[in-house]
């Protein structure tokens, strides 16, 4: 029985109906996390956590009541950074953060807003409080998507010093969910610039505005490096044909399911550090042709320099013309495009031996200029030890070359080839189909070798690139 005029006694362990007009209550729903809730109310995770005395952002419970500060005075959000994604422009980013375009341009020292490039990091300085009302008026629902790795979800670009664990914690998602969404089997193998999809988190305002013909577009990594491979994944609404042009070359466009296309952007060594246009041309089934250009940045690889001394009897082989002639032969074989794919997942190592000379190293022979780069990775295998196929494929060359000596080339399909050089023995013939790990020959010192080792190359679309990237990272 409750007596009239008597105040009910309520345990105040969690916030109830607020008496403060500057505060409201949010009841945590299934699938929500602190990041998502903060975004909904125009707050930072930190502000929301502080208002509720939350120490671990992971410990949010469904049904938990959170105090949402609706301060009349402006909330001064700390400056934050934004990494430019495909489909974003100054206009859409300014809208996303509810800030003035001109200030965004000025604060980031941007001289030409059309030169905004993918992966560019912008400083976002919020000028005033973002109230829930202004957020709600600009909500645009994200288009439905079937692809997990797409820019229409929330993505995170891995920065130096971050781990999968800290990222999962920051977004309040589990490690397992983050790994599944990004197809990561080994959480220790992540790299700077890698784009992660944050599962279950959708941005409130979609800052990505792609042409109608494009359903989704992603570039991995967002910033490309000379000597490395980038991957562009495109899904279209109804395309009959897609072409791609980058670094003044037409790149093979791989059809990978209905309306899904993949392009490997192999960046040649010594490509100058700059921003380059990547142009997609989409011919729709209606006959309409749409051209869309992304600005992609290429940065230097910093592969180092080595001085190599060759015995006098082999010195004749170091002339540039011999080098070029051999590369021309290799280009003729590994520049072809086979639409069938034989590889699946990361490449396996071709020798059970330590790598003693990495890909991309600039080389000076017998004191000459460091004008040539190492086109492969060397493994210090003992003479006669086995050399194994890095992935399944067809043998498309078994020859003895001037510099590389006895060599075997495997076509893995989709423009991907591996070459194994300086062999002492080879166990395969032209046209053979080999499986991953199959022994194809033995380590030797044939050709221009200072000692027995395996020289291993990976070529993508006719360009030698770092094979170790494909060991650590699963393509496609
Ligand atoms: Zn080598």
Image: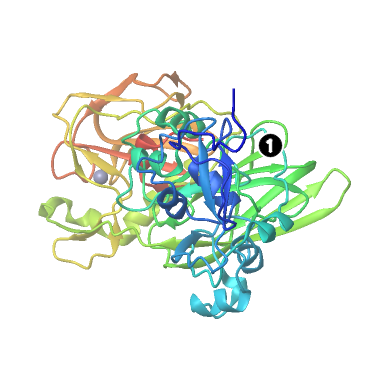
Say which of 166 and 249 sits in front: 166
Ligand 1 positioned in quadrant:
top left
The single residue placed furthest to the front in the displayed view is 4
332 lies above or below 290: above
Say which of 462 and 87 sits in front: 87
Q: Where does residue 330 sit, x and y in percent of width and height?
A: 43, 44
Helix, strand or loop at mark 1: loop
Name which residue lies at 73% across and 51% down.
140
Numbered-mark total: 1
Residue, disc 1 = 145
Q: Where does residue 269 sit, x and y in percent of width and height?
A: 38, 57
As drawn, is 250 to the left or to the right of 259?
left
Quarter of the rendering containing residue 390: top left
The answer to whether residue 232 is seen in the rendering is no
The single residue placed furthest to the right in the displayed view is 286
272 lies above or below 39: below
């Amino acid at each position: 029985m409750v007596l009239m005029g008597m105040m009910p006694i309520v345990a105040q362990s969690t916030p109830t109906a607020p008496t403060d007009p500057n505060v409201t209550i949010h009841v945590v729903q299934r699938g929500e996390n602190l990041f998502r809730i903060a975004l909904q109310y125009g707050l930072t995770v930190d502000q929301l956590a502080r208002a509720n005395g939350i120490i671990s952002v992971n410990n949010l419970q469904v049904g938990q009541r959170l105090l949402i500060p609706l301060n009349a005075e402006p909330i001064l959000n700390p400056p934050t950074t934004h990494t430019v994604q495909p489909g974003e422009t100054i206009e859409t980013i300014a809208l996303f953060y509810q800030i003035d375009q001109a200030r965004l341009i000025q604060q980031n020292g941007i001289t030409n807003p059309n030169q905004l490039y993918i992966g560019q990091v912008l400083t976002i300085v919020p000028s005033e409080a973002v109230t829930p009302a202004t957020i709600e008026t600009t909500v645009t629902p994200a288009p439905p998507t079937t692809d997990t790795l797409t820019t229409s979800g929330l993505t995170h670009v891995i920065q130096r010093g971050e781990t999968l664990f800290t990222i999962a914690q920051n977004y309040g998602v589990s490690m397992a969910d983050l790994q599944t969404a990004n197809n990561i089997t080994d959480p220790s193998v992540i790299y700077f610039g890698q784009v992660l999809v944050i599962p279950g988190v959708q941005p409130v305002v979609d800052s990505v505005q792609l042409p109608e013909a494009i359903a989704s577009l992603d570039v991995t990594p967002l910033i490309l490096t000379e000597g490395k491979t980038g991957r562009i994944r495109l899904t279209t609404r109804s395309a009959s044909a897609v072409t791609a042009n980058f670094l003044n070359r037409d790149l093979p466009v791989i059809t990978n399911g209905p309306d899904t296309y993949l392009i490997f952007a192999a960046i040649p060594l010594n490509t100058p550090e700059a921003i380059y246009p990547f142009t997609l041309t989409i011919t729709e089934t209606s006959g309409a042709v749409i051209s869309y250009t992304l600005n992609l940045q290429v940065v230097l690889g910093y592969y180092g320099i080595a001085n190599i001394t060759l015995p006098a009897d082999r010195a004749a082989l170091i002339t540039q013309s011999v080098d070029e002639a051999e590369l021309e032969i290799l280009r003729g074989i590994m520049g072809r495009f086979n639409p069938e794919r034989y590889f699946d997942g990361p490449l396996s190592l071709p020798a059970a031996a330590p790598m003693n000379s990495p890909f991309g190293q600039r080389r000076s022979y017998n004191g000459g200029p460091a004008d040539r780069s190492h086109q492969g990775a060397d493994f210090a295998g003992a003479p006669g030890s086995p050399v194994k196929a890095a992935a399944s494929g067809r043998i498309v060359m078994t020859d003895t070359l001037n510099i590389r000596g006895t060599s075997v080339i495997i076509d893995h399909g989709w423009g991907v080839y591996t070459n194994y050089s300086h062999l002492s023995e080879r166990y395969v013939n032209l046209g053979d189909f080999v499986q991953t790990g199959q022994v194809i020959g033995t380590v030797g010192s044939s050709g221009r070798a200072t000692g027995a080792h395996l020289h291993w190359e990976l070529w993508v679309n006719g360009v030698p690139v770092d094979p170790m990237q494909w060991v650590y990272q699963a393509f496609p």
